[in-house]
Image (tube, helix red, strand yellow):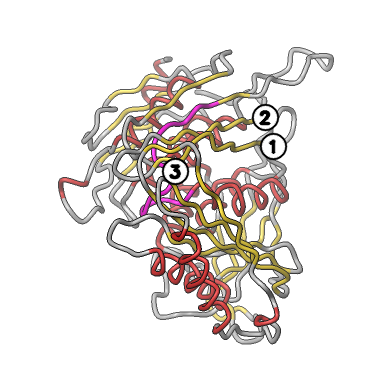
Amino acid sequence: MTDSLTRDMLTIDGSLLEGGGQVLRNVVAFSCILKKSLKIENIRAGRDKPVSSGLRPQHATGLRLVRDIYQAKLNGDKVGSKAIVFEPNNVTEATTFLADTKTAGSVTLMIQISLPPLLFSASPPKSIFSPPPSAVNVILKGGTSSKAAPPIDFVIEVFKPIVERHFGLNFDVNIIGRGYYPKGGGEVILRVQPLVGKALTPITLLERGHIVSIKGRATVANSGNQVTQKMIKSATRVLNEASLKGEDNITQINPQIEVNHEKISTGKGFEIVLWAETSTGCILAGSGVFDRDLSPEQLGENAAKELVSNLNQGGCVDEFLQDQLIIFMALAKGKSQLLMGKPTLHTRTAIHYAQVMTGVRFEVSELGNNNEVVSSNIVEEGQEDSHGLYLIECEGIGLVAGQKINEG
């Protein structure tokens, strides 16, 4: 790396706000895309127990994955490490990568750190006649369902359609086999078509609309067939008894929950993910992820209650999608606008570090009963006592993929 990059290294305090692995994933993704060298200190210092702080296997594996993609210099990538140095370089010409946590570490969190850099991994075209860049395949191994991460079905059924439709992304996520705690062993293939010669389009989601369908997937691996029916029955009961704001016909919507008997899985597990689609194209979800202390009935009930709670907030995205959109809003060309419920701590954290890394400004406004702005610039304090609607706005930097970045 050049001396100028070393001198201009940005130091990030990973203990601020959420203080977890999200800080690491977001700032390292920005580092790759913007060619900014980083030193991150106090990694995951916000975790409850000292033994839980520092890098876990999925964090270390995700770091090594983007290191390999960007031929970066990486120091401190040992499990338990509380500080790293990351210096991105030029993208490798390789088109296949392997990232194996060798544990039940979340594959979806590895998607979060690698997808944005992969989208911007194409080299500048040599001429207008240059062929498009080849798609990049990443084989991810670990856990596909975790209490501390979005389940893989959420990524496929909620995250993927929203970001493809609104930001102009092109990628696929294919499940080869599922993996559950404590063995892990799941395998997912992420296939990304890098952008070239264009920027991400901004997202505009301001109208929630009415619910037009409720779908779901109940998955069981190496457990009895009756497990899925127990999850579906309890989830359906909660949905049928639900009272949703502004939805007079919710009881007339018959949830379509498919049964998935997983043929390839390491270990035993079961889970259920539900998602509601609206007339304006919004998708909101609720999930019950595998937990050895919870029954199938409890998972189904939890998923349905979570979906109902997200729908009752009245926003266009749920609490789990909020923060995942921030990095794309910051990079897009033009003004993004997003109507949602109360910003989560993860969302406020994502906004803080997006502003630090890109210089963009996010406006977060609390809305009144008639959607008028009652307070604005709400990021750090979070308005914990509010349950209303919020508007997030951002004029992105408009980074053109394949555009040479000023590295000095």
SS at circle 2: loop
Provide the major secondary structure of the magenta segment: loop
User: Residue 400: where, in percent of width, then height?
Assistant: 69, 33
Instruction: Tell me the crowding category of disc 3: few under 14, some 14 to 19, or many 20 or more residues within 10 angstroms, Cα based.
Output: many
Which amino acid lies under the numbered mark 2 shown in the image of this protein?
A: Gln
Depth check, front residue: 242 or 4: 242
Tell me the quarter of the picture where residue 5 sits: top left
Q: Give the range drawn in magenta.
A: 138-151
Depth check, front residue: 335 or 215: 215
Callout 2–callout 1 Cβ contact below 8 Å: yes
| Pointer 1 or 3: first along the chain | 3
Which amino acid lies under the numbered mark 3 shown in the image of this protein?
A: Thr
SS at circle 3: loop
SS at circle 1: loop
To which residue does mark 3 refer? 144
Depth check, front residue: 196 or 253: 253
Q: Which residue is drawn at 73% across and 73% down?
A: 209
Which amino acid lies under the numbered mark 1 shown in the image of this protein?
A: Asn
User: Residue 111: where, in percent of width, then height?
Assistant: 50, 38
User: Residue 232: where, in percent of width, then height?
Assistant: 52, 66
Magenta segment includes 162: no
Q: How far apart are marks 2 and 1 (CA)?
A: 6 Å
